[in-house]
Image (spheres, helix red, strand yellow):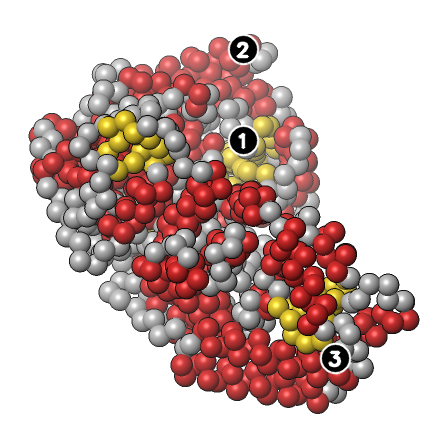
Amino acid sequence: MRILSENRRRFDQERAHAFSVFKDSGDAPSLLNRLSAITDQAVMRQAAAQGLPQTLALVAVGGYGRSEMFPYSDLDILVLVPEHWSEEQRAPVGSFLTSLWDLGLTVGATERTVRECLEASSDITVATALLESRLIGGSSELYSLMKSEFLERLVPRDFFRDKMLEMHQRHARTGDSPYALEPNVKENPGGLRDLQVFAWIARASGFGDSLYDFSVNGLITTREAEAMRRCLMFLQRLRIEMHLAAGRHEDRLLFDLQNAVARSMGIEGSGDLRPSEMLMKDYYRNAKSVIQLCLIQLQALSDRFAGRSSAPAVPIDEVFQARGEELDLRRRGALDDSLVNILRGFYLRATNPLVQRPSIGLVRELWHAVHNPHARFAADAQSRSVFLSILKLPTGVYRTLHAMNTWGVLSLILPAWSRVEGQMQHDLFHVYTVDQHTIQVIRGLRHLVYAEHAHEFPLLSEIMGELPETWRIIVAALFHDIGKGRGGNHSLLGETDARAFCEACGISREDTEFIAFLVREHLTMSHVAQKQDIADPEVIKAFASVVKNSERLKALYLLTVCDIRATGPKVWNDWKGALLEQLYRATLAQLGGNLPTRSSLLELRKAAALDLARSAGVTTEECEKIWASLDVAYFLRHSAEDIAWHASALSSWPGSGALVRARPAPRLSGLEVLVCAPDRAGLFTTLVGCLQRCRTSVLDARIHTTRDGRALDTFLVMDLGRRPDPQEAAQAIAETVSRALSSDKPLPPVKLGPLSRHSRHFPIRPVVLIEPDALGNSWLLSIVCNDRPGLLYTISSVLSRSGVNLQTARISTLGERAEDIFQIDGAPLKDPAECLKISREIVESIAPDAAPLSQEGKKPDPFPQPEEQHS
């Protein structure tokens, strides 16, 4: 065991005492200053022990230089040595820097002369470090010389330019959004670094060293300085608690830490929100405030460097004027208590070709008006009229609503919006807060209007061009999730809010019903497409009875796609897109009276498949012989192209052993696998195990038993191995499955993989439901749980052991949440007690070995009421 030095023991004891005081007081600035002082003393003791001469200077840089030493921050130090020192004179410096690691912190150290510092200061990172440096000990003359010469060389305008470029690059690396589920509280937009960038530029520009100085010197107002101080203290406290909870340098607010940090900060749950959700809501609101304040201050600095516009003011109305490219106010205080003037500012910014940006005066007035605790903003008829005009804008709707949300204006006109601002969604597939998700949905819808985006989704863009009054879809999107976080069905709550809004705005009854329908049914189309057999005309007929007409269908289709795509990058894929398009086209045909009946659909599909099979060299007789052994369900569940492909493969198969074929899926980014083999117990489970060993994920499975006792199974899979050539991947999968089926040795079982880190902290209570299908010929098994490797194999194993036959499997993975639908049959399902037994065994099989605790400390209920599911 390594023996700690006396300096390290003293350092640890003093830090532990400082942490103890902090836990009682929660005073973040005091702790940071105290830790910096403790570190200074430890560094100087170490310097004395190493015999460093007083002719050099020990300089703190980085956060240490700002006297903001977080519990496990890096120890950033510059050793400033005199010019022309020999190697022998510099030798003790290296030993000293190495010895600093004894303190148990990560050391970032540099040894330079004054000349070397000045040469290196052309790098913006070095320049920033020198700007906020401070002397720890040693030669004050040497340090003063370096600092004065550095400041003399520093060009504020260039420093501002470089820091802004650096900030934009940093924001781009973090997705340009503060609303990550596990944000980096230092680097993400709205984090500590944004506040530091402003302070660095203000300091370089000669406005002082603190928020107080910036206020006294006229750069910011007293209220702005106080708001920035509150934001800074929140982030400092949060980062301290994160370091202490993790026991290491950790700047990401991980799921693992959120509960512990919330408790340490005294945050309790409220209503349906857990403490961790309340913490994140506070964080996102603080991040939004940081973004607002930094936008104001950085624009103010930009104006000082660029100079105010000398263009004459051109009046627009009694409140606003254009000055060059800027929208400005004609009189100060025009936004106080005037919601209509605030909204008109956003409307004019979007519609007036003379203006490109708001003036710093207008931005400042907006911030002060919105954040005035005594302001009373009434959403009257005039303000609603302006807001509706914004929603009806031919261009700029998304940009305007995004800006209104950034500045906190949407919650003024829509009081219910304040409930979803910063509302985190712990469902493991939403990557945005509710308000940001909604804004992203609107962004997707507006992209469909513009020709430059038509290549992304041609059909959707075509449909958008056909629809009249597309503003109604924007209104529906605005309300589709506004009911979240209140408990109950958010679709119905949103419908109620949407109806009230439409009535208050004087929207016609017809348009109100259209909007209310979209909000109420915004989950229906994805549910039908992903969880019902959309090859069945009866399913299409039932869905058509819900939408009622083609205009509603088109709007719902657009909203559904944009809703899913705005949920997260792992949720949308080509397979879901194909299902939704198939449902849309079939329902459109049904509404137009053109959807064939089951019998006519069967004949049409057979005829089309026969033409395709003949062109592939398969005779009519061979097709009829193959098809004679298949039932109606087979033809309903497969396209004509698939049926022809199957016929081509089966016609060349001698009928013994197992037939396995695979190919890249037409029009989809996946692979299709066809297996025909003598039917036997556990065959499907074996196939699923083989496919998992091939590093694939099953999206869809269709199981058929021919009249002569063979299993004809088809799978749509995604290649998780990311093999570059889809054709080679298909061949490799076919060979692997074929070898497994021809082997006499049983395959070892596939083990259920562990939950991911995210899933462990937000476990989904498994929901298992077995109920008869609409026709009463089979049963539907619905399963909602955490996704993980081996899940499908585990479920199919239970069904096989229970004597249950699997007809189809529809696999839907939403991030790390699995929502799977299986069509099953078998004698055991006719007995309610057996159904309960099967359900319980599935729950026990897919649950972790040790059931994870929920955030309230309770084990999840294995048989809860089914939760509302999202697309």
Q: How crowded is mark 2: few (under 14 residues within 10 Å), some or many (20 or more)?
A: some
Look at discs 3 and 2 and give the one toward the viewer.
Answer: 3
Task: Give how far across and how far down residue 231 sits, in percent.
Answer: 39, 61
Q: Are dots 1 and 2 in contact, CB under 8 Å?
A: no
Residues at marks 3 and 1, CA–CA distance in whole angstroms? 62 Å
Q: Is mark 1 on a helix, strand or loop?
A: loop
Task: Give how far across and how far down residue 24 sits, in percent.
Answer: 41, 83
Residues at marks 3 and 2, CA–CA distance in whole angstroms? 88 Å
* Residue sitting nearer the eye, 179 or 237: 237
Q: Mark 2 points at which residue?
A: 614
Q: Residue at x 67, y 40 (%)?
A: 736
Task: Give how far across and how far down residue 497 sits, in percent.
Answer: 16, 44
Q: Name the residue under label 3.
A: 47
Residue 124 horizontal side relative to residue 232, left or right? right
Q: What element carries label 2?
A: helix
Residue 82 visible in the displayed image? yes
Q: Mark 1 points at which residue?
A: 669
Look at discs 3 and 1 and give the one toward the viewer.
Answer: 3
The amino acid type of the residue labelled 1 equals Ser
Q: What element carries label 3?
A: helix
Q: Residues within 10 Å of mark 1 (few under 14, many from 20)?
A: some
